[in-house]
Every structure is written in C-alpha cells, then in structure tokens.
Amino acid sequence: MFSTRLSFNARWLSSSLLIVLFIVAACSQVAQTTATPNPSHSAKLPGEQLWKQGVSSFLFGTNDSQEWAMNNIETNPRIQDALKAAHFTLMRTFFFDKSLADGHPTTDAEIEQRLQTIERSGMTCFGVLQNIFDIAFDKHVISYAGSRCQIYEFGNEPDGNGISAAQYITQWNLAIPQFKRINPQAVFVGGAGARLAYTQQFLQGTKESGIIPDAIDIHWYPCWQEGPTTCLPKATSILDTVQQFRDVMQETLGYQIPVGVGEWNMDPGNNFTLANDTAFMTSFTKTALQSIVLAKVAFANQYDAANYSGYGALDMFDVSQPDAPPKVQYYTMKDIISAYFPS
C-alpha cells in the first residue's frame, strides 16, 4: 500500500506541477491577453443555487479521492457532520474502477458508501468517472447512482496521465451519448484539470462532433514546495487563469460555457511548511476563496477533505487523530461560507 501511494502521489505531483508551471507562465503573459468580460454567473448545474451577492452555492465544495488511511471522510461520521454543519455544498467524489491502494475492483458497496457519504454531509454529488477507457464501469456507476448523482466529470487530469487530446476527444465522443441515454438529466464536465492548450484542442474536437461539455474543469495549485512569503502573493492568480480559459472558450466556441475549479489548494504535494503554518493557511484560504468568488466560476472544490492526501498536508481534517478534528482551512472556509449562505 505504501509503495502504491508513493506511485500515485508521484504521478499526481507530476501532473499538478505541469499545471503550476502553466499558471506561472500564463500570469507573465496576462498583460498581452485580450480580456473577455467576466460573465454574470447564473445557476446552470443540477442542484446549484445562487446565494447572497449572486454567488454560486457550488463554490464551497471539497473532494473525496482515494482513501489512503482507515480514518477518512467515508468512515468517520464526525467529518461528514462537520461538513454539513458548515454548509459545504458540492462533493467531488472519485468513482475508480479499481482501488489505487491495492488494485481490487470497485464494488457496489463502495459506490454506495461514497453516495451515502455525500448525502450524510448534506452535499451534492459531483462524480469523477476516473477511467475513461472502462465505459462499461462508468455506465454502471451512472445507472447505479440514478438521480442521486446528476453531475459527472469524464476522467481526471488526462494530460498528466499520458492520454493525448485526440484520445480524450475520441473517448468523450464515444461515451457521453451513451451516458446521456442512461441519465438524460445529468450534466457532463470535461477538461478535467487539463492545461490550456489541451483544453482548447478538446473544445475544438467537441465543437466538430457537436457533443460539447456542459462545463469545463480546471485545477489550481499556485505554489510548489515554497514558503509562505513567496506563495501567499499567488493566492489571487486564479483570476488570471480563469480568464485565459474563458478567452479560449470564446475563441474556440464563440460563446461561454460554465468553468469551475474542481481542485484547489496551496500546493499539490506534502508541503507541511505551509500546511502547518496557521497564519499562512488562514490568509491563503481566505484570499484564494474570495478570488474564486470574484472569478464568478460555477463551482470550486478544495482538495481535499480527509483522504490522507499529501500525507495529510492537504486534508481539512486531521485523520492522524481518532476524532479527526478540523484544521484551520476548514474553519476559514466555514467563516466565508457563512457570509454568503442565505440564512
């Protein structure tokens, strides 16, 4: 299990690092970009609401990825209750066809556990169909979940997993019509955290096929093994990143579709220098989430709730303790949510 987690983390960090490098490059060129005005966001995703100031309720989400520890979001009801009490809204949960930890095929009981975790947390399901080549399994998930999950993402960071844009487009065009026949009410998100050029190729391919995604997902980790002094100024860079994706949408499609930030945090790795710095995590989380609000995106999901990701550095709850107490990022997000929640 330990070596498997290292392999997964290495792949994860590699793909995320590419995204970070793109963001750094993109920010340096922002002055040369022709800006597309930020559209006024309107609720378009199943279950989405507009809260105070017209802010999407789905900006206050989190992730449930591979479980690397026995104490996790799915096994600890205290974590689920805390998320519900704070009014977190959108849980991006991964439907793996096989466990990343030991390779066993995913069972219906495990699919059910993910769905029940979302429901007990009082949140809406945002399912990641991780393996884009196992369409039979993906169709089974959609059929099994039924109306309990109406938002799906096709794959996760395909560009970082050796999947070419041409392959991704081919699988998208093959799979999405089949998925829609199973659940006509469901929406399907594409891009899955991919880089700008990859996303542009994807949009062009779906424009040609007519199977255009209902939304695009980008992932945002602005720092890489940095300290608080250099990382904190990057907490607003999501504004430039989202704008560049909107420019590509306008150029490629001629109109805008919803864009969201399916994963965000300070650093994609096990940066405990930042994670254990209470003052930094408070400031970064507050600035980052308020920047996401200003970007008027459709959804945003902190990575992650409690999966022992980054060996615990990225978790909102401390799963090394039996009661998994919340960490500072949870409390900071809770305070921001309370400012927008329509009490």
Image (cartoon, rainbow, N blue to C red):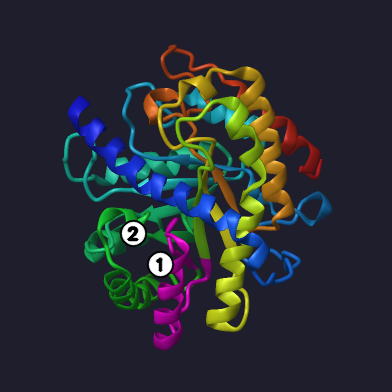
Identity of the residue drawn at 21% across and 25% down: 2
Identity of the residue drawn at 49% across and 32% down: 305
Mark number displayed over residue 13: none
Magenta range is: 186-215
Mark 1–mark 2 distance (CA, rounded to whole Å): 7 Å
Residue 215, can we see it?
Answer: yes
Q: Looking at the picture, tell me which residue is in the foreground, 146 or 57.
A: 57
Residue 314 placement (x, y as % from top left): 47, 30
Residue 185 placement (x, y as % from top left): 50, 70
Residue 34 placement (x, y as % from top left): 67, 72
Identity of the residue drawn at 23% across and 64% down: 133
Crowd tier of the residue under label 1, counting other residues whose Cα lies within 10 Å: few below 14, some 14–19, many 20 or above: some
Crowd tier of the residue under label 2, counting other residues whose Cα lies within 10 Å: few below 14, some 14–19, many 20 or above: many
Residue 84 placement (x, y as % from top left): 61, 34
Q: Is residue 54 magenta?
A: no
Residue under label 2, please give it.
159
Quarter location, residue 5: top left
Q: Looking at the picture, tell me which residue is in the foreground, 310 or 227.
A: 227
Task: Identify which amino acid the numbered label 1 is placed on.
Answer: Tyr
Task: Identify which amino acid the numbered label 2 is placed on.
Answer: Asp
Secondary structure beneath label 1:
helix
Q: Quadrant of the C terminus?
A: top right
